[in-house]
Image (cartoon, coloured by chain):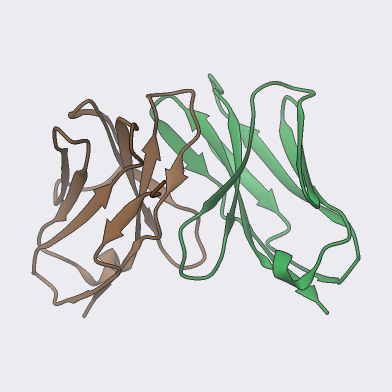
Amino acid sequence: EDQVTQSPEALRLQEGESSSLNCSYTVSGLRGLFWYRQDPGKGPEFLFTLYSAGEEKEKERLKATLTKKESFLHITAPKPEDSATYLCAVNRDDKIIFGKGTRLHILP
Amino acid sequence: DAGVTQSPTHLIKTRGQHVTLRCSPISGHKSVSWYQQVLGQGPQFIFQYYEKEERGRGNFPDRFSARQFPNYSSELNVNALLLGDSALYLCASRKDRGNTEAFFGQGTRLTVV
């Protein structure tokens, strides 16, 4: 069964304290792994697509990496405005399968 | 460029009623998908439409239906609403099927009372 598991469920960091969010997946026929950011009551905002193991993508304080079983979203020196829920998802044919997300809270 | 637009933004309905949600994809995008997101969970796939045909269906009852119009906009219909249908309904726009990024609208918050 296709599955996406994110950990931790919630994470509180001090401003400037770097950390990583984990996404493990089991899916047959992976056609890309996505990371999204979602603010409360809003739709998910696209961040990255990763297609193959070893691939890395960066955007401002965020860097996403991919292995054959996991993806990591590394957050370097976060700021309060980085507080949001981060969703990992796998692209499976015509549908996208999401994890439950990691709620990230950055304290000033 | 306009992003994905959904209407209405908020909606309150009574159990047993019917609801229609609307989505306009990004200009040039031919694929529209619908997702349901309940509080504390990730979005769950409902339907995908591409070139006006249904290309995928998630594990939702037949009360849920959708269609895509010649201009690639889409409607999601839900009949005989239940309290459990209360959720954020998201529309995703993709340039083509399969191997392309999906961009989401702001969603329609449906509350069933």
Chain letter matching colour brown: B
In the displayed structure image, the side of residue A43 where residue B15 appears, left or right: left
Percent across and percent down for residue A39 are 56, 66
Q: What residue appears at the point 72 percent right and 30 percent down from the top-left corner?
A: A69
Q: Nearer the viewer, residue A100 or A16?
A: A16
Q: Is residue A56 above or below residue A78?
A: above
**Is residue A66 visible to the viewer in this orientation of the structure?**
no
Q: Where residue A72 sits: x, y (%)?
A: 77, 42
On screen, B3 above or below A51? below
Q: Using the image as rendered, state which of residue A75 and residue B83 is in the foreground.
A: A75
- Whether residue A65 sits left or right of residue B102 in the image: it is right
Q: Nearer the viewer, residue B59 or A12?
A: A12
Q: What shade has chain A been given?
A: green
Task: Tell me which residue sits at (8%, 69%) in the image.
Answer: B17
Residue A57 x %, y %: 75, 35
Q: Nearer the viewer, residue A55 or B39?
A: A55
Q: Looking at the rendering, which quadrant does residue A70 occupy?
A: top right
Relative to A10, is B25 on the left or the right?
A: left
The answer to whether residue B77 is above or below residue A67 is below
Q: Note whether residue B44 is visible.
A: yes
